Amino acid sequence: MNPTDFVAALRGCAPYVHAHNGSVFVVAFGGEVAARPDFEKLIFDLALLHSLGVKLVLVHGARPQIDQQLALRGIKTQTVGGLRITDRNALECVKSAAGALRMDIEAKLSTGLASTPMGGARLRIASGNWITARPFGVRDGVDFQHTGEVRRVDVDSLRAVLAQDRIALLSNTGYSPTGEIFNLRYEDVATATAQALGADKLVFLVSSDPDGWKLADDTGDAGQLPLAEAEKLLDARHLKDQDRGYLRAAIAAGRNGVKRVHLVGAEQDGAILRELYTRDGVGLMLYADADYEATRQATIEDVGGVLSLIKPLEEAGILVPRSREQLELEIGNFTVIVRDGTAIACCALFPFPQNQMGELACVAVHPDYQRAGRAAALLKRVEADAKRRKLKRLFSLTTHTPHWFIEHGFEQGKIKDLPVQKQRLYNYQRNSLVLIKDL
């Protein structure tokens, strides 16, 4: 990376460094991710998250490690409805696999060699009996024995660990008040923990690529999916059972108060950093908060964002230049689409009530978000606003994009069709086309 690109990248992630500092993230990954030869790189990235001020709770599974232990001991188990029936012999394999993996993860997080990204990290790890479990019981005549489900999360103890600037490490096991040990789905542990803590984010690192699930292709944004849309896609036929399990866990977390749930493929190097510290990320994000991408009236705080959208169009001669002072005076006429705090599209409605007309102006969409229907969404909102103001027609002056307006119901008009005030200001050198739409 050349110095210019490095500085640009660092500046680009700065808003997310500030936003995530002090936030609680629950990061969950299965045993298949921990078994990858490049698992150490993920550990380095998690250490970096911690050094950037994120309060981390890690939850790991151990299915392939349990399978390996079962095979070594010649033990066969049954799976019913996606759950392993854990008898007493299988439980010994669960304890062995989960315990060994937990120690391996702790060892990797304890790395401090100067030649690695962990140099100087000095991470402190804590684990404990924070998950109270109960037996899954007998379902449809099947006794699941030592397979359990989460009953309660010791939130106070977890928060105390995080307050001490430690990383909390949980596994796929839980304990009952009577001293029993239960084999749990790590996805359920992660979901219950995120809900109980009121975590800012729940992140599942998965062995497949969520982008390949093709769940959000019809939303106009392949990387982000509203919770309501995700619920509709839960029964998609092309989803693998394991991926459906991740999606089901993500939806459950969203329904119970976790605003952002990220599904990130573990194969791509640095995927978790790109997902969390860039605007669009590389995974699939389910969001329950309506304000992640919102269309609203602009405020004075949006002046800088609107200027950044319209300046390239002004320089290209597509829009008439506006000074910052003029924009500050007119900002109340603007509508913006804001995505994760950044203005990505805007337009303005200037009313001429005496003529029952309104001017649609300054339609601009950030290049990264074009061809996804956002300009049309702005037009729809402006039309509704114009009707509320009892305006009967919209007009726009354009030199470069007449076809877009025509495709959205505008017809070519004449200068004399404009309000008198606008006729007086018409720039004959620009020779803009007049386009009018009846409401």
Image (cartoon, helix red, strand yellow):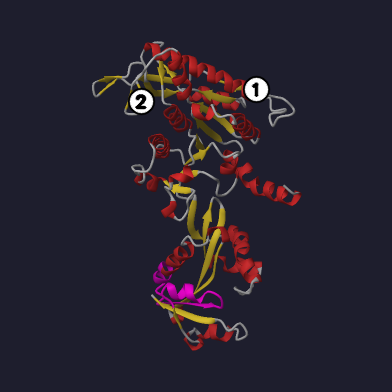
Farthest left residue in view: 141
93, above or below 252, in the image = above
Residue 56 on image: x %, y %: 57, 30
The residue lying at 52 percent from left, 32 percent from top is: 27
Bin the neighbour count of mark 2 within 10 Å (Cα to Cα): few under 14, some 14-19, many 20 and up: some
The residue lying at 49 percent from left, 17 percent from top is: 97
Q: Which residue is mark 1?
A: 110
223, above or below 178, in the image = below
Q: From mark 1 to mark 2, how far is it between C-alphas? A: 33 Å
- Disc number lying in front (1 or 2): 2
Residue 353 on image: x %, y %: 45, 77
* Residue 285 is at least partly visible in this image: no
Q: Quadrant of residue 151?
A: top left
Q: Quadrant of residue 189?
A: top left
Bin the neighbour count of mark 1 within 10 Å (Cα to Cα): few under 14, some 14-19, many 20 and up: some
* Residue 61 is at least partly visible in this image: yes
Q: Which of the numbered marks, if any, corresponds to residue 83?
A: 2
Mark closest to the chain's N terminus, 1 or 2: 2
SS assignment at label 1: loop
**Placement of the C terminus among the 4 image quadrants:** bottom left
Asked if the residue at tag 2 contacts the one at tag 1, i.e. Cβ–Cβ closer than 8 Å, the answer is no
Q: Amino acid at mark 2?
A: Leu
Q: Amino acid at mark 1?
A: Ser
SS assignment at label 2: strand
Residue 75 on image: x %, y %: 39, 14
Q: Which of the numbered marks, if any, corresponds to residue 217?
A: none
- Magenta highlight on residue 338: no
Magenta stretch in the rendered image = 384-410
Left or right, 111 with respect to 290, comes to right
- Magenta highlight on residue 390: yes
